[in-house]
Amino acid sequence: LFSIGRLDYDTTGIILLTNDGDFSNYLCHPKNKIKKKYYVQTDNKLTNKEIEKIKSGINLSNKDYVKAIIKYLCYKNSKHIWDIQLTEGKNREIKRIFNNYNISVTSIHRYEFSGIQLGKLKEGKYKRLNKQDMKLIKAKYAYI
């Protein structure tokens, strides 16, 4: 089996597994701009100007150029909640984006990968993708 993508040790959420190496490589390669969506909690809030900069792309301290679509959702239990969409997912990218503005990330949860949503699946559980799910992904990205 191949895992499609990865999560940091302190991040929760969806990971896809497959026995199709071509499919795995396609969904993992940055050039294909596969969407990954996350809920993120932080201790502080970005400004609208900072959000626009991130959407256009910013250079981080290690000279990585990153872009993300960031939407502020709410303030709950002393945390700011965000919906973030990435297409690359470089090493600890979300944390590095917020750290660039001196904001600490307290929680990251990936709820969608390539159009497949985690939904109500409990932590540690799995579901087998059906033929309809696979057709959706393959048609959307036409990887072969």
Image (tube, rainbow, N blue to C red):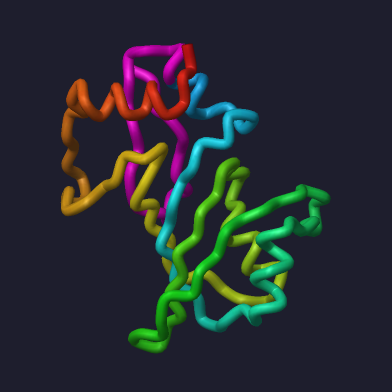
Residue 131 x, y percent position in the rendering: 20, 21
Residue 108 x, y percent position in the rendering: 43, 60
Q: Quadrant of residue 20?
A: top left
Q: In the picture provided, is 129 more to the left or to the right than 83?
A: left
- 2 is higher (above) or lower (below) than 136: above
Q: In the picture provided, is 79 more to the left or to the right than 135?
A: right
Residue at image point 29% right, 24% down = 134
Residue at image point 76% right, 49% down = 65
Furthest residue toward bottom: 78
Q: Quadrant of residue 116?
A: top left
Residue at image point 36% right, 47% down = 112
Q: Nearer the viewer, residue 42 or 132?
A: 132
Read off the magenta span: 1-23
Residue at image point 17% right, 48% down = 121
- Is 48 magenta? The answer is no
Q: Is the N terminus in the top left, top right, bottom left or bottom right quadrant?
A: top left
Q: In the picture provided, is 53 more to the left or to the right than 51?
A: right
- 26 is higher (above) or lower (below) than 46: above
Residue 15 x, y percent position in the rendering: 35, 38
- Is 15 magenta? The answer is yes
Number of numbered labels in the structure image: 0
Q: Nearer the viewer, residue 82 or 100?
A: 82
Residue 128 x, y percent position in the rendering: 18, 28
Furthest residue toward front: 139
